[in-house]
Structures are given as structure tokens and as C-alpha cells.
Amino acid sequence: MDFLFRNINIAGWKRVSFLLVFMFSHFFSQQKIVGYVVDDNGENLSSVIIINMSTDLKTSSNSMGMFSIEASPNDELRFIKEDFLRVFARVPANGFNSQLLVTLTPIPKDVGEVKIVKKPTGDLEVDSRLAGKVDKGEIVQQAVGLPQPVGKMREKPAEVKQVLLPILLGNLDVQGAYDLISGKARRQKRQYRYDDLQEHIKWVRDRVDNEYFTKAGIPEERISEFIQYSFEVKPQVRTYVKAKNLSGVLLRMEETLPVYIERLKQRKKQE
């Protein structure tokens, strides 16, 4: 009789062990991933549809742009919203330990008339009016059906209101509180601003020859500095960069050129 009970107990433990192993493996392979969806100006986007292409699970972002969805590492997530370009992103291996930030880019509404300019002439006034209303590379890309670049997927810095509000409701975002206290959130914001600035400067330099600036009186080693200066004194320049409107960029930079060159002259006199 004791032998029979021992066999029953062993069989029972085997079943329980099997269920525990199955439950733990399922829990660790698929968890909730949390993130935020914003536009290219950093504004929260609501009602964005998020689809896990591996499991066909769907959810949508709330009024604060926040979403959560079950996923496993390397699952592909698709982000869809009307009037915005679709974004595809892979769930990183450590995606469950931090909030993700996904950026969607608006679809251009009207490209207008496009004139082909092979190379800038060096005359800002002439070139700014001959340049197309949108980036030619973007038009060709859309025409031939090349894949669009995915949006930025990076950790969203903790915000004071997003940490304090859950506390009032009886919940504590430990990671968010630590990020604020340790200064990590502040460093992230500073790094993101720097990265975006360098990306926008590069966008302009990739599309305009150095000769364009040097003929206008700007030393080659100060071209990037001039572009950054234009961003600061004429924020519209950067707005046109985000819209990939080269004509608008050149027109607004033309307005900052005389002041910048005068500053260079004053600087040389002081030297």
C-alpha cells in the first residue's frame, strides 16, 4: 500500500512539475512591453494601432501616447496611424526593462511642382528658389516603392508627472523614480537633443555641396556651425528640415547669412 501511495505521489509531483515548468517558460518568453508613441515634434500620439506580427495581438496607444502589449524578444511590432508612415520595429532583448519611445513621421500632403537642380550654383538667392519644395530623394523613393526608414525606437525619459500621478493612485514606478532622482532622465533628454541636432545638420550637409556655403563667404570648417546657428536664430529652418523641404531650408538660412558673416568678421578683428 505504501508503495502504491509513493507511486501516486511521484506521478502527481511529475504533473505539477511539468505544469510549473510550462507556466514559467511561457511567463519568461512573453511579457508586457511598455512604451510611448510620439510624432517628429515629440508630441504624444493617441489611437496608434500596435500589432505584434508574431502573435497577431493588437492594442492602441492612449491619450498620452502610452501602450503596452505582450511580446517576446525579437518579435516584430507594427505601428499604424492614419496620415503617418508605418513603422516596423523589433522588440530588443532588454525591451522589458525600460519604456520604449517610437517616433512616427507624417505623410507629406502635397509635394507641389518639382524642378530638377543637378548642383547648387553657389548663389543662395538663385539656388534657394530653384531647389524643389521637397527632398528629391524622398520623391524618387516613393515613386519606385523603396522601403521607408523606420522611426526612432528609443527609451522614453521619465517625466515628473508620469511618475507622481501613479503614486497618487497607490502605484510606484520604481524605475521612473530612480531615473528622475539619479539624473538619468535629464541626461537622456540632453543626449536626444544633441543626437537630433547632429542628425538635422547632417541632413542639410548631405544635400548641399560645401561650395554652396564657401562661395557665400562661410569657411568650410564653419559650415556645420553656421547651420546650427541658423537653427537657433531661425527655428523655422529646423522645421523645414523635419519636413524635408530643402527649398524652405535654403530660403530661411539665407536670412541668417549676413548676420553670421558679420559675426565672423567681428571675431577676426578681436583675434
Image (spheres, rainbow, N blue to C red):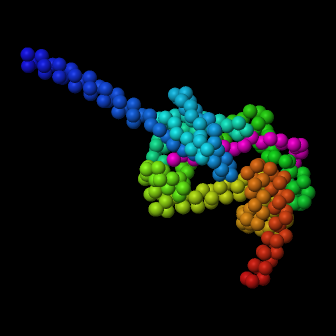
Asked if residue 262 is among those painted magenta in the image, a careful observer would answer: no
Viewer-nearest residue: 146 or 245: 245
Q: Is residue 31 left or right of residue 261?
A: left
Residue shown at 47% from the left, 50% from the top: 169
Q: Quadrant of the N terminus?
A: top left
Q: Is residue 146 visible?
A: yes
> Residue 115: x percent and y percent?
89, 45
Viewer-nearest residue: 215 or 201: 201
Viewer-nearest residue: 90 or 122: 90
Instruction: Write the start and end of the magenta stretch as one range.
Output: 99-117
Residue shown at 53% from the left, 58% from the top: 160
* Principal secondary structure, stretch drawn in magenta: loop
Which residue is at the far front? 169
> Residue 253: x percent and y percent?
81, 61
> Residue 40: x percent and y percent?
68, 49
Which residue is at the far left? 1
108 is higher (above) or lower (below) than 239: above
The answer to which image quadrant residue 26 occupies is top left
Asked if residue 108 is among those painted magenta in the image, a careful observer would answer: yes
> Residue 168: x percent and y percent?
47, 53
14 is higher (above) or lower (below) than 93: above
